[in-house]
Amino acid sequence: MEWLSDPQAWIALATLTLLEIVLGIDNVIFISILAGKLPTPAEQKKARNLGLIGALVMRVLLLLSIAWIVRLTAPWFTVFGQEISGRDLILLVGGLFLIGKATHEIHDKLEGEEGEKVVKVAPKLSAIIMQIMALDVVFSLDSVITAVGMAKDIGVMITAVIISVGIMLVSAGAISAFVNRHPTVKMLALSFLLLIGTALVAEGLEFHIPKGYIYFAMAFSIVVELLNMKMRRVSKPVHLHDGYHEPSSKP
């Protein structure tokens, strides 16, 4: 705990915590969309909380296994001249899973009941949590590698992860309610997941897309959507009051 008296460690903690929150936003959105498929608000909240707690446990365990994480960047095998490491493999599988899941959700939202010939069965809580945990591995790996690259002390890394996940736990309910309340925002969030999945696949193939480009595209899309939401509120038709009668056109 010597880092507590080091000003540089505090700066690293603040910076890393902010980055962990930014990296965790896509995780929260994904968890909110998956949890929103459950039939009751209680189950949705339980899935969100268990998913984020699972993410916290996963990240702490990975941080405690830094030596193993470092070895993940070493090539495991080669395909068509492309070296594939353990990290690349996880990013590829996770990215493809994200793309597939987001595409399925977008199709489901666009087709709705007209595209389905049978009555859907509500997903089970255990199945949703398993899906959340599977993606936690991918998001946690990216988060942990960022932490290892920014801080030297394991205490700083773990503290930053705990603070960021705590903030996400508090805000997950509000984010989930907002996303579920606005269908166009949910579609935008699913599009972000497609973008993130594509970026993960590209990263797994050693094609680096600067995170700044991705965050700028997402931020720009969010601003446009907020303007659209404001415009829709302003353009809502004004209903006549019950006690008001239009003037008669008869003389």
Image: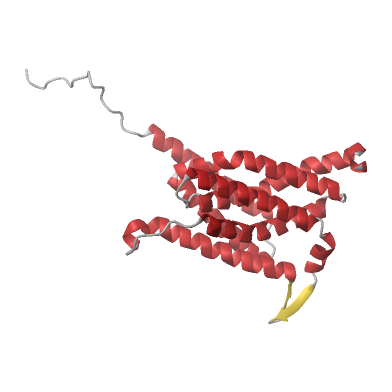
Looking at the image, the residue that sits furthest to the left is 251
Q: Residue at x 16, y 19 (%)?
A: 247
Q: Is residue 224 visible?
A: no
When the figure is inspected, residue 164 is found, relative to residue 145, above or below; the finding is above
Q: Quarter of the image containing the N terminus?
A: top right
Q: Where's residue 138, x and y in %?
A: 67, 60
When the figure is inspected, residue 30 is found, relative to residue 223, above or below; the finding is below
When the figure is inspected, residue 160 is found, relative to residue 133, above or below; the finding is above
Tell me how the rendering is colored: secondary structure
Q: Classify residue 17 as left or right of residue 51.
A: right
Q: Residue at x 87, y 49 (%)?
A: 153
Q: How many marks?
A: 0
Q: Classify residue 106 as left or right of residue 32.
A: left
The foreground one among 177 and 225 is: 177
The foreground one among 206 and 187 is: 187
The foreground one among 171 and 54 is: 54
When the figure is inspected, residue 5 is found, relative to residue 20, above or below; the finding is above
Quarter occupied by residue 137: bottom right
Q: Where's residue 89, x and y in %?
A: 69, 70
Q: Classify residue 110 as left or right of residue 160.
A: left
The foreground one among 89 and 212 is: 89
Q: Residue at x 70, y 50 (%)?
A: 56
Q: Residue at x 57, y 60 (%)?
A: 131
Q: Where's residue 90, x and y in %?
A: 68, 67
Quarter occupied by residue 181: top left
Q: Is residue 74 visible?
A: yes
Q: Quarter of the image containing the C terminus?
A: top left
Q: Where's residue 141, x and y in %?
A: 72, 59
